[in-house]
Image: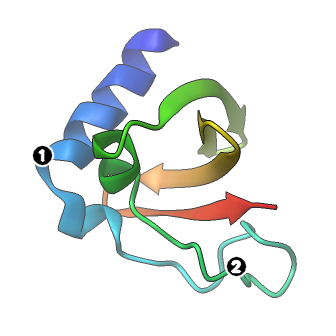
Amino acid sequence: MRRLVALIVLGLAASPAAAQTANPSSSLGGPSGAVSSGSRSMGALVAEGYEIKASSPTGNRFVVFLQKEGSAYACEFVTLSNSRCGEID
């Protein structure tokens, strides 16, 4: 499990533009697919010092939770080029 998360992080860090591809039909953020204005790429978050705290498979997707001090993000992955992150309130 940790190897998979490490591979995802390395892949996104190598191509941050690919990680910014948003999927409007994504379930992250609720039924409407809305994400708070804090939508970011995982590569950018890791570069800013956010740490991976947990990951969970959800069907054919993975949700990775990142945290730094008082803020947290959830990133949903279908593939390396089809993912997005949103701030958790």
Residue drawn at x 24%, y 66% as measured from the top left:
18
The residue lying furthest to the front in this view is 69
Q: CA distance from mark 1 to mark 2?
A: 25 Å
Q: Which residue is mark 2?
A: 36
The answer to whether residue 52 is left or right of residue 15 is: right
Residue 14, numbered circle = 1
Contact flag, marks 1 and 2 (Cβ < 8 Å): no
Say which amino acid is labelled 1.
Ala
Which corner quadrant of the image does residue 19 belong to? bottom left
- Toward the viewer: 69 or 32? 69
The residue lying furthest to the left in this view is 14
Which numbered mark, 1 or 2, is in the foreground of this view? 2
Mark 1 surroundings: few (<14), some (14-19) or many (≥20) residues within 10 A:
few
Mark 2 surroundings: few (<14), some (14-19) or many (≥20) residues within 10 A:
few
Say which amino acid is labelled 2.
Ser
- Toward the viewer: 86 or 76? 86
The residue lying furthest to the right in this view is 31
Where 73 falls versus 64 (above or below)? below
Q: Quadrant of the C terminus?
A: bottom right
Q: Position of residue 55 (x, y in %)?
A: 64, 28
Q: Secondary structure at mark 1?
A: helix
Where 41 falls versus 69 (above or below)? below
Residue drawn at x 59%, y 54% as measured from the top left:
76
The answer to whether residue 73 is left or right of residue 34 is: left
The answer to whether residue 14 is left or right of residue 61 is: left
Q: Position of residue 9 (x, y in %)?
A: 32, 35
Q: Secondary structure at mark 2?
A: loop
Where 36 falls versus 73 (above or below)? below
Q: Position of residue 64 (x, y in %)?
A: 59, 38
Q: How is the image coloured?
A: rainbow
- Toward the viewer: 70 or 55? 70
Residue drawn at x 87%, y 79% as measured from the top left:
31
